Structures are given as structure tokens and as C-alpha cells.
Amino acid sequence: MTKENQANKGRKKNFVTIEERDKALKVDLVDFMQQTGFELKRDSDKWYRSVEHDSLVVNRVKNTWSWNSRGIRNHNIIHYAKEFLHLSYPDAVKMINDGTYHENKQIQPTIRTNKPFVYEEEIKEVADFTKAKNYLVNERKLHPKFVDILHKNDLIAQDNRNNVV
């Protein structure tokens, strides 16, 4: 054994493999939080709420937690262990993977699809843009060149009710 290997033998592993991270992310966050002493109440099949901090909510379907009053949104189980159990990232992953926690079977990937915008049936664009431009420039204080560029590129228009669409 080389001197370098002997020196590293006593050191704690301070990195996490992708497989270890992925395994930890599959652990049920609600189960993990409850087993680590965090009291939750069930609001619905999807949502759980902290008893102590009512703005801290857990989305069981996405397996994420958010603390709305602090502006913390959509964090995972590893971030929970770091934040509330005061663990480093590698220690958090190790604790999650070494425990006897349930795997979350409800996790669903979120797939967003962009649907084309559909105007209301009775709204029709008109060729005259003067009232819309006047409103945007004089009332909303947008620069006239900016408004012209948006209109030229068909990003805004005026409808038959003189609204900007």
C-alpha cells in the first residue's frame, strides 16, 4: 500500500456518485421527514404541511418541499437533510441511503407542453394600431421604438375593442 493510499484510508469519502444521489432522490420525503422527527399533517393525497411551520409544505407527487414564507421552492430530500439536519451534501446522501425509508412510488416527472395561445372567438385583430400605440406610449410609458418593434414583429396588435393583444 502506498503512502497516498494509507493517508486516504482514514479519510471520509467526500463525494457522491450519480447512482448514490439518484437512489437518495427516490426515497419518500414524507417518510424520511417523519422518521427524522419532523411532524407533518396531511392536507390531501398530494400535499402535506408542517405542524410547526404552516408555510412549509411537501408535494408528495413531486417529492419536493417548499417553505413559502422564506421563498424556498421545490427542494428535494437531500436539501431537506442539509437544511434541517445540518448535514453536508455527502453526509445527507449517505444518511438517506443508509436508512430504512420507503421509496416514493408516486414521483411523476413533470412534462410541460407549450400550447399555442388561442384568442377568444369574438376578438379580432384590426389593422389600425394607433389607439393601442397611444396607450402603450402615453399611459404605460413604453418607448415608441420598442412598441414599433413589437408591432412590426407581430408580438402585439390592437383588437376590435381597441385593446392591446
Image (cartoon, rainbow, N blue to C red):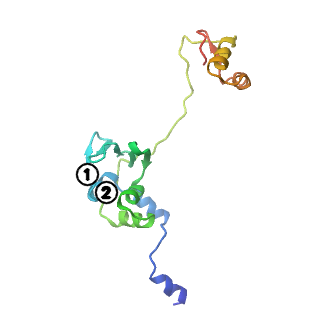
Seen in the picture, residue 80 relative to 165 is either above or below; the reply is below
Label 2 CA crowd tier, 10 Å (few <14, some 14–19, many 20+): many
Q: Is residue 57 above or below residue 122?
A: below
Q: Residues within 10 Å of mark 1 (few under 14, many from 20)?
A: some
Instruction: Indicate which disc residue 116 carries.
Output: none
At horizontal 35% and vertical 61% (from top left) the residue drawn is 85
Image quadrant in which you'd find residue 145: top right
Residue placed most toward the observer, 138 or 106: 138
Identify the amino acid type marked 2.
Phe
Residue at x 31%, y 51% (from the top left corner): 30
Secondary structure type for disc 2: helix
Identify the residue position indicated by label 1 in the image: 39
Q: Quadrant of residue 69?
A: top left
Name the side, left or right, on which 127 lies relative to 3: right
Q: Residue at x 44, y 44 (%)?
A: 71
Is residue 72 rendered to the left or right of residue 148? left
Question: Circle 1 — which element?
Answer: loop
Image x and y of residue 12, in percent: 44, 76
Give the mark toward the camera: 1 or 2. Answer: 1
For mark 2, what is the residue? 32
The residue nearer to you, when weighing 83 against 61, is: 83
Q: Looking at the picture, how far across and down is residue 29, in whole percent?
A: 34, 53
Residue placed most toward the observer, 156 or 52: 52
Q: Residue at x 44, y 45 (%)?
A: 73
